[in-house]
Image (tube, rainbow, N blue to C red):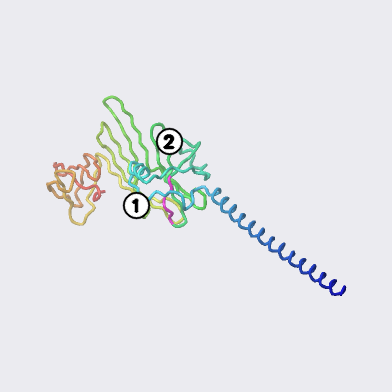
Amino acid sequence: MKSILLFTSLYLFLACKESSKAIKKESIIVIDSTTSVLNKNIDKKDLILNTCIGDEQSPILKLPVNGGNNLMANTFEEGIKLQELKCSIDKMKPQLCNSDYVNYYQLPKKGELLPIIIEDECGDNNNYILAVFYQNELIDNILIYSYWTDMEEGNSKEKIKDFKINKDYEIKISDSEFQNKKKTNYKINKYRINKTGKIIKIKNNSLMVGSIVYAQVETYLNMRSAPNSNGDIIAKAYPKDGLKVIEVLDGWLKIELNGKQGYVSSEFVK
């Protein structure tokens, strides 16, 4: 009888010991699993903190963007706020009026490239700079918006650089000069972002008062009585005709041909 009791006690002791081992083992598994989850969370947090440009959750400025005024209107209407740039931009700091802190608007990705628009406070006005990053490294940048004025009495001068960026990342930058509110010079340059992130100039088309331009058409270009498509056709400019620029307007030129003055679309002359 004693031997039976002894055997039963020994069996129960060993069973409890094995059960205790199993519980400990399960506890270790749970602890290890929790540790693994915590490590994953920490890694994700560090990844976000170490990314100099916002993640996919950050507010993105939609394309197209048609100029500085349009940029400000879009960001206000869509509630898009400036973000702090944490990337190293030492090589472009000499271009900035304020390099102590740099804020930006995030644009849609272009493949693996990250284009942004940097806002640079310059006195009473803001400049805007298009910058392209790849893996947190600045690849290229270009000034796309600025405003300068000298309001002397009787002789005011203004210089305005403005831009348009379409959905295909074609960039148009215009430079306009005014004297006493009259546009005197106008120039448009086109750019694109190549596969490596470089901002490449496509073509240069300079239109200045006093310059001679030619119609870039196969037949002829209508010269109108007013700077719009509803103006009466008063003459025809052929590709061989030299057209003297009298005044530069938005999308139109006032030109002189054979002693007669009229307007032609600036899109079709060079």
* Span of residues in magenta: 105-110
Depth order, front residue of 218/74: 74
Q: Measuring 61% from the left and 57% from the top, which residue is drawn there?
A: 37
Q: Is residue 222 above or below residue 149?
A: below
Whether pointer 2 and pointer 1 mark residues with C-beta atoms closer than 8 Å, the reply is no
User: Of helix, strand and loop, which one carries label 1?
Assistant: loop
Q: Measuring 18% from the left and 56% from the top, which residue is drawn there?
A: 219
User: Looking at numbered disc 1 in the image, what kind of residue is underneath it?
Assistant: Asn
- Which residue does the numbered mark 2 point to in the structure image? 121
Depth order, front residue of 225/47: 47
Verify whether residue 108 appears in magenta: yes
- Which residue does the numbered mark 1 point to in the structure image? 166
User: Looking at numbered disc 2 in the image, what kind of residue is underneath it?
Assistant: Glu
Is 219 left, or right, of 26 in this rendering? left
Q: Which numbered disc, 2 or 1, marks the residue that appears first in the sequence?
A: 2
In which quarter of the view is residue 77 placed?
Answer: top left
Q: Measuring 26% from the left and 37% from the top, which residue is drawn there?
A: 183
Cα gap from disc 2 to disc 1, whole angstroms: 25 Å
Q: Residue furthest front?
A: 1
Magenta residues: mostly which secondary structure? loop
Depth order, front residue of 18/117: 18
In which quarter of the view is residue 175 placed?
Answer: top left
- Residue 90 placed where, x, y %? 52, 42
- Crowding at dot 2, Cα within 10 Å, few <14 / some 14-19 / many 20+, comes out as some
- Residue 71 placed where, x, y %? 36, 44
